[in-house]
Image (tube, rainbow, N blue to C red):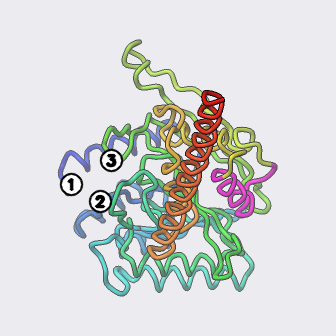
Amino acid sequence: GGWDPGRLSALQNVTQLISHSFTSQFVFPVLGHTEPPSDLYQQLIALWQHWLPTEALTTFQKGGYYMIEQKARKLRVIALNTNLWAVENDVEDPGGQWQWLDSQLAKLYRNRQTVYLVGHIAPGFDERQGSPPRLGLAPRHNARYVQMISKYSEVIMGQFFSHLHSDTFRIVYTHTGVPVSSIFLAPAVTPQRTVSGTNNPGLRLYKFDTDTGQLLDYSQYYLDLTAANQKGEADWSLEYNFTSYYQLSEVSPKALHDLAQMFTTEEGKEVFGRYWVANSVQVYNLPTNLAWVNAHYCAITQLDFTGYHNCLMTRASALAAASSGQDAITSAAFLVLTTAIIFLVLR
């Protein structure tokens, strides 16, 4: 929906709560699902100016995006306003965000400085969405983002998005198929109960190397909403640690690529089952349909429409062929068994 007094009031309440809870921590606010009207930017600046330096406030005023640097921690964060690239904004460079982002990444690349990218709508498709699939970003912006990430992947240490309310990830490849960057999508604090997906509330804590910026691990916390409603109180608990949950030795694009490939194998059924349960933050039971594996695998590994469509078609054909082959084997076995029975009866 659009912006109304209730939405702004909710933002004020959340800002106050976070400020009170994390008094000594750095907070990087990022615009979410709905683009605010231009006259509201000034109110948001007044709300968040205690977190952002002057340079960040300048670009935020222009389009809701900014870069912030904590030199003592060698930490740089680029906060994107992905609303500018949403499907309804299919124009060349809304808000000048593309030109700004390219200049920032080019400068970081020249200086060999690392950065995290944070936004709301990730490129690619909803892994839980039915047919026809829809991009979250306009096609031109989706393609441009993936190309830019591939170009500057050496200095991008992590990408963190949300929007889908699900727990999943994406992999960015070069044009030759080499995994060079990854995107983590964290589940939301707000629960969702829709036909496109369901989730319990979740919170995530990332662990990274303060010298290199390398992402090391994360801990996913969750709230069992059904149990909370029954008890009348919220009991947040640790759901899993990423590396131990998936038995990974590192968090890298190559490791995530190998994990996604494992989802599609017979040996990886149990691993995909873990992912499937985590995807809804402990709402779904174990998967029973191989088509679900294909939908998630293609969404994770193919972020453009053509690649995603081809992936789904290829895997659907393979699944159908495997099913036909199994039917043929079953029919042949039945024929042999029938012949044997007839032979025994006649004899």
Q: Residue 11 got which mark?
A: 3
Q: CA distance from mark 3 to mark 1?
A: 15 Å
- Chain part drawn in magenta: 249-264
Q: Nearer the viewer, residue 99 or 292?
A: 292
* Residue under pointer 2: 34
Q: Are marks 1 and 2 in contact (CB under 8 Å)?
A: yes
Q: Are marks 3 and 1 in contact (CB under 8 Å)?
A: no
Looking at the picture, which amino acid does disc 1 mark?
A: Gly
Which residue sits at x=49%, y=69%?
308
* Residue under pointer 1: 1
The N terminus is located in which quarter?
bottom left
Left or right of 6: which side holds 342? right
Is 106 drawn above or below residue 65 in the view shown? below
Q: Is residue 71 visible?
A: yes
Q: Secondary structure at mark 3?
A: helix
Quadrant position of residue 191: top left
308 within the magenta span:
no
Q: Nearer the viewer, residue 87 or 56?
A: 87
Task: Please report whichever mark, 3 or 1, sits nearer to the chain's N-terminal start.
Answer: 1
